[in-house]
């Protein structure tokens, strides 16, 4: 909106609006704006959630954790509306809505926020709706909508390589980008001969798995005060850097990574996401005054996965998201082993952050150390971009 306003008033030589043409300024401004929105509206939204009695029941499968979480009962959840609302407001004001990648990103955010919101609402109002009421969406129901979103968005992203009605099978936007792989020849800046270009079905499968998988991974990580928000900040900053590089032809060719035109506009989304999570951390740090719930967690994971698909940096962003992957991996291992052995467990309880807690680590220590690991992984992943 502000970029549009700057274009309309450009003839009036209003110098202060000229900064709207600078993408880096808009991205950083989006981070600051989303942070301030969450910070300022936090108390009002928390009070509203309390009045609606939208609180966390503290329910868990482990008896020890059930006792521990009794102190968190009735803490307002669905705080993700703060995160999502501030991200969307920042994008609307500071993003270039004429860019397709930005519009697709908005679809991802809203789709998963609505899905998570429905799940949260069913869980949190089950008691008031009487016995027999549904305790949230079934896992298969959520998965269908997540996979459906992944298929649709991946198809649209792939179509960005369509030129005059025909798909350019050698478009760099369809490349499988692997670590240490050179997209361009360092001397000629021509495409490397060793690239693997993905067909539409393979591209859609990979994109769907990344978007839906990351959405679930962040949701599973959201189990301790400040954990998912803090890790999301680190990964969003890393994604911000990758989007900026991918959308700049000079930097992309210099670093020998795929150049994806207009992908740098997603840096506004990443900046807004990092700022919103930072603001939410103000209210969500221990002891948390509000939880994000599925409303926020599903969207955060989905947008991280979406940026990975657009920038062709799936492997790098998965490395940045190592904490998220370890969390969802621990659940998959626990469930699989439990079923295969007739009741035996690998961890005391899954996801892994609860196992660490039951092993004697204080909750704040678990959260802080996972933040540290995430920052280290982001630094290593960005260094990997340079090593070609």
Image (spheres, rainbow, N blue to C red):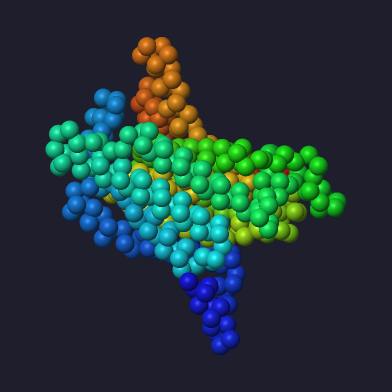
Residue at 40%, 45% in the rendered image: 297
Residue at 25%, 42% in the rendered image: 122
Q: Position of residue 357 (x, y in %)?
A: 37, 30
Is residue 244 shown to the viewer in this render?
no
Q: Position of residue 383 (x, y in %)?
A: 66, 44
Q: How many marks?
A: 0
Whether residue 166 sits left or right of residue 293 in the image: it is right
Q: Position of residue 272 (x, y in %)?
A: 47, 58
Whether residue 331 sits left or right of residue 8 in the image: it is left
Q: Is residue 87 shown above or below 140?
A: below
Camera-side residue of 123 and 233: 123
Q: Is residue 16 shown above or below 286?
A: below
**Going by the picture, which residue comes out furthest to the top?**
341
Residue at 55%, 66% in the rendered image: 98
**Going by the picture, which residue comes out furthest to the front?**
165
Is residue 39 shown to the viewer in this render?
yes
**Going by the picture, which residue comes out furthest to the right?**
187
Q: Is residue 175 shown above or below 87?
A: above
Whether residue 132 sits left or right of residue 160 in the image: it is left
Residue at 41%, 11% in the rendered image: 341
The C terminus is located in which quarter? top right
């Amino acid at each position: 909106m502000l970029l549009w306003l700057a274009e309309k008033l450009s003839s009036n030589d209003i110098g202060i609006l000229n900064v709207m043409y600078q993408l880096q300024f808009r991205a950083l401004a989006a981070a600051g704006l989303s942070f301030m929105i969450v910070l300022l509206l936090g108390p009002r939204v928390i009070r509203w959630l309390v009045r609606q009695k939208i609180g966390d029941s503290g329910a868990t499968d482990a008896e020890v954790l059930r006792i521990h979480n009794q102190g968190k009962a009735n803490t307002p959840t669905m705080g993700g509306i703060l995160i999502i609302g501030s991200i969307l407001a920042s994008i609307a004001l500071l993003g270039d809505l004429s860019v397709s990648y930005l519009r697709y990103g908005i679809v991802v955010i809203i789709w998963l926020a609505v899905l998570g919101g429905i799940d949260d609402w069913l869980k949190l109002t089950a008691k008031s709706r009487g016995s027999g009421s549904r305790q949230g969406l079934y896992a298969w129901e959520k998965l269908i909508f997540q996979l459906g979103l992944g298929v649709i968005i991946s198809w649209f992203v792939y179509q960005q390589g369509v030129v005059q009605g025909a798909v350019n099978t050698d478009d760099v936007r369809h490349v499988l980008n692997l670590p240490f792989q050179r997209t361009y020849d360092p001397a000629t800046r021509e495409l490397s001969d060793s690239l693997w270009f993905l067909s539409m079905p393979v591209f859609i499968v990979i994109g769907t798995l990344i978007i839906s998988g990351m959405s679930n991974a962040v949701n599973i990580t959201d189990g301790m005060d400040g954990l998912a928000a803090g890790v999301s900040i680190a990964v969003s900053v890393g994604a911000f850097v990758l989007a900026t590089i991918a959308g700049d032809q000079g930097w992309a060719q210099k670093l020998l990574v795929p150049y994806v035109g207009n992908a740098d506009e997603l840096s506004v989304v990443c900046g807004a996401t990092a700022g919103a999570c930072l603001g939410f951390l103000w209210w969500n740090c221990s002891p948390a005054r509000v939880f994000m719930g599925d409303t926020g967690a599903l969207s955060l994971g989905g947008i991280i996965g979406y940026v990975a698909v657009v920038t062709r940096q799936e492997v790098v962003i998965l490395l940045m998201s190592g904490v998220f992957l370890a969390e969802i991996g621990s659940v998959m291992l626990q469930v699989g082993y439990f079923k295969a052995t007739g009741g035996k467990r690998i961890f005391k309880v899954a996801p892994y952050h609860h196992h660490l807690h039951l092993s004697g680590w204080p909750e704040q220590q678990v959260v802080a150390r996972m933040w540290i690991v995430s920052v280290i992984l982001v630094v290593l992943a960005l260094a990997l971009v340079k090593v070609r």
